[in-house]
Image (spheres, rainbow, N blue to C red):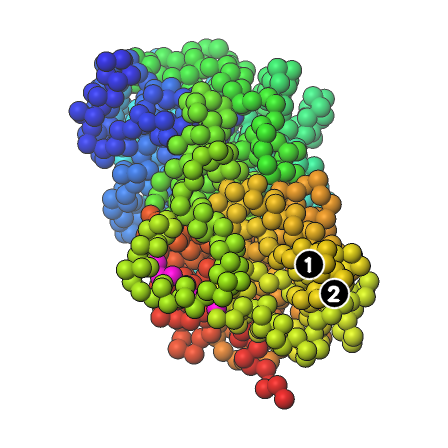
Amino acid sequence: MTDHAELEAALRRGVRGDVDFGVTARALVTMDASNYRRVPRGVVAPRDADDVAAVLAVCREHGVPVVARGGGTSIAGQATGTGVVLDFTRHMNRLVSLDPAARTAVVQPGLVLDRLQEAAAPHGLRFGPDPSTHGRCTLGGMIGNNSCGSHSVAWGTTADNVRELDVLTARGERLRPGRDWAGAPRGLRALVEGELSRLRTGFPELPRRISGYALDALLPERGADVARSFCGSEGTLGILTGAVVRLVEAPRARALAVLAYGDEGAAAEAAAGLLPYRPLTVEGMAADLVPPGAGLPRGGAWLFVETGGETAGEARARAEEIVRAADVLDSLVVTDPAAQRALWRVREDASGTATRMPDGTEAWPGWEDCAVPPARLGAYLRDFRALLASHGLRGTPYGHFGDGCIHVRIDFDLLSEAGVGRFRRFSEDLADLVVAHGGSLSGEHGDGQARAELLPRMYGPELVALFERAKAVWDPDDLLNPGMLVRPAPLDSRLRFAPLPREPVPVVFGYPADGGDFTAAVRRCVGVAKCRTASAGGPGVMCPSFRVTGEEAHSTRGRARLLHEMLAGELITDGWRSPEVRDALDLCLACKGCRSDCPVGVDMATYKAEFLHHHYAGRRRPAAHYSLGRLPRWLRWASGARLTALVNALAAVRPVARVAKRLAGVAPERAVPRLAGETFSRWWRRTAGRGSGGSAGADGSHGGGPLVVLWPDTFTEHLSPSVGRAAVRVLEAAGLGVTLPPTLRMRGRPVGDGRSRSPLALLTARHARVCCGLTYVSTGQLDHARTVLRRTLDLMEPVLETAAPVVVLEPSCAAALRGDLPELLPDDPRAARLATRVLTFAETLERYAPSWVPPRLGRPAVGQTHCHQHAVLGDAPDRRLREAAGLDGELSGGCCGLAGNFGFERGHFEVSRACADEQLLPALRDAPPDAVVLADGYSCRTQVEQLSRARARHLAEVLAEALPDEP
């Protein structure tokens, strides 16, 4: 056997947890949230401390390094390695105990911070530090990096909140570090006592000094706290297997004062002056990182200052006191918890939004969290801006202004040799600038590979040599995370971009936001891992498959990592044919939630369609791609041949349906939806004499009111024509003229009415139907999709020559026309024109019938916002329409789980149902008896029908039912 195989076999013999040396497992951990990449030999998910000891023994015997990994959100590269990666998130992720009286908790290293906060909250307690990644970072990672977060001005760093640790050394010694030299390895006390003078004078005094080893915590006047000194050691001294952490009392009420300043310099100058008022946070950010409509007061930069109290009034009074003391342009005090959360999301998402400059240029970490004394922050920022300009670089600082800690992503060119050289020169100059201001190279995320090489500039060679001696005491074999903190790898080596192709990869989609470059699109994922949160929360969607399986491969980040490795070609060597990438994408619902919820706008649904197109090029596809992917074709054929009654009859015969589903690749658990006896278009032709239809003028007008073109999508046409009929009735009641798109392409074209019966035109025209191509896109049949879309554009040309809007009732079809159409046909100007014409049902009424008052229902509403509507279209007009109609209550977020073809495909039923069980089905169970169940998407309505006893309806159906009876 090879050494690689011997190592794997030895680990499998000694470890009860999961040992995985496969390509997928290794590819998923080649990177963290930094600029660096290392390919490990294998990944082990230990079940307990005994498993960790066994891994260390085997790796010590084989001379293989070990790296501990939590959420994988480290910024400096310390969660990657070339040996064995220990993944603590799978099994060692429990809250062992919580003692409210002692205000302590015993945790395992893989416990996600939010799970601890949820357990502590009923007791009025919380863990003080709270990084913006609190929904996915782990306590072990926080201890390894000495993480802080926005509340550190009140509750300190992780090191300030640790009582005791359980640690395994590389040589298998079990230690319990604490105060008074408890748990110190042999030789550490003698080392410290021989260097007391250096330790008392060599460390700068500031609240956010994270760089290097905290050896000064071992001074006798500081309690000789071995646990505190271990924090921030980045897995280089020992492997953490458990911890006792301190909890703090959470304020009963909070208020958020948002203070507006002219620029970030003014905000930075003001931050230190607010500290005497004992706020809970003093966070700063500038306008560059704030999305439109964020609801912030007028200004160019803001401080987010949170206060607490026993009552809402007390918290507000403290916030207002701070507002009075601050010299601000404008201010806002918020006490509503939901409004506060919305504002905090703007700040928390900055770690992702900062990765793109306003013009779309990529920006990268590397100097993510330098810290200086708070009183010097304004001066430091001015010098920092000047240094950026001198190197021809740009970045947008934000962060923990009250602690003097600045986060920034900089538009380094890490793809070219010249750009990497500039990255090194800037790093060296910035290190000198930070030191000149009395600061720390790292103020939160640790040194890792990004900054460790520059530690001699901060501490001097003698103290850095002392760090090396301390490492040797703990880990004499240099087995644990070598190349970090001491004897580091060069900061410009092993960059994750190095193996990626330099020329654009031939693709089908246009990727306009990434310059047409699929590699740049994949690079969007920087690893902040918002997709790994255990709950979507509120209206969020991303990432439903991860929340069901808990597997990294089923997160947006995991899939992006696999695509990165596919492009790199080192670990995944078969490119587009990769089974590893295919299998990871198989459970992607193409919900598009990441397109809106990911801070950097990763669009995994598009990447999946692109991959499937190439993966199956010239090969046989899964049966579901032919049956469900080409559904519009089959439904049109059945309707045209007048076979719908026969199809329905056969589908009702269980043995026939069972065989048909097996042949079609459909999940056996699914019922086959019934086809409509009369399509929407046939109903339209039968009833079009009521005044709708016909041609429109160049301005889109039609008689007394504006003309709108109602899109007969496949689902409305063949499966739920009642939605189309209801929409026509509501639109006409609102004073709009309604028509359908043309079905024949001909010269001298009118807008069309679904009939196009010009006798002369019939001699030369070709009969067709418009289609958004959605089912072809979702199954990666992109050549078919483009053919369908070109034919659609041909038919829609007369509509595009008018001002008439195109009303699309099915949210997924509207999203396909707005998003996929212009990206699949970027060179056809008609595609962009049609995309801009597409409106949802609610948007149409709001824009073209603003004075219309809908019928008042006065009932509660329950249901789910379609994931594509959330991600691509937005639902604000729908909310306003529901409110005007007296439909009270918020629709749930998440994804229904059916997601078009996904939930119907064989092997997906359990995941599909689990997705529905997250938010949708509980909302239905908790709904009052008179609630209206709303779901504008056909998939959502089908999922509700098949998994519950409820009947969901499109908003148009609900409104139409409440209209006065027609004469």
Q: Position of residue 283 (x, y in %)?
A: 57, 43
Give SS at disc 1: strand
CA gap, disc 1 and disc 2: 10 Å
Q: Is residue 682 above or below residue 508?
A: below
Residue 178 appears anywhere in the view:
no
Question: Residue placed at 66% from the left, 47% from the top?
Answer: 790
Residue 657 in the magenta stretch? The answer is no
Q: Nearer the viewer, residue 911 or 471?
A: 911
- Residue 415 at x, y percent in the picture: 60, 21
Residue 880, percent across and down? 61, 68
Q: Residue at x 33, y 59 (%)?
A: 657
Tag 2, which secondary structure?
loop
Q: Which mark is residue 758?
A: 2
Residue linked to disc 1: 744
| Residue found at the far left of this picture | 13
Name the quadrant containing residue 31. Answer: top left
Mark sitting earlier along the chain (1/2): 1
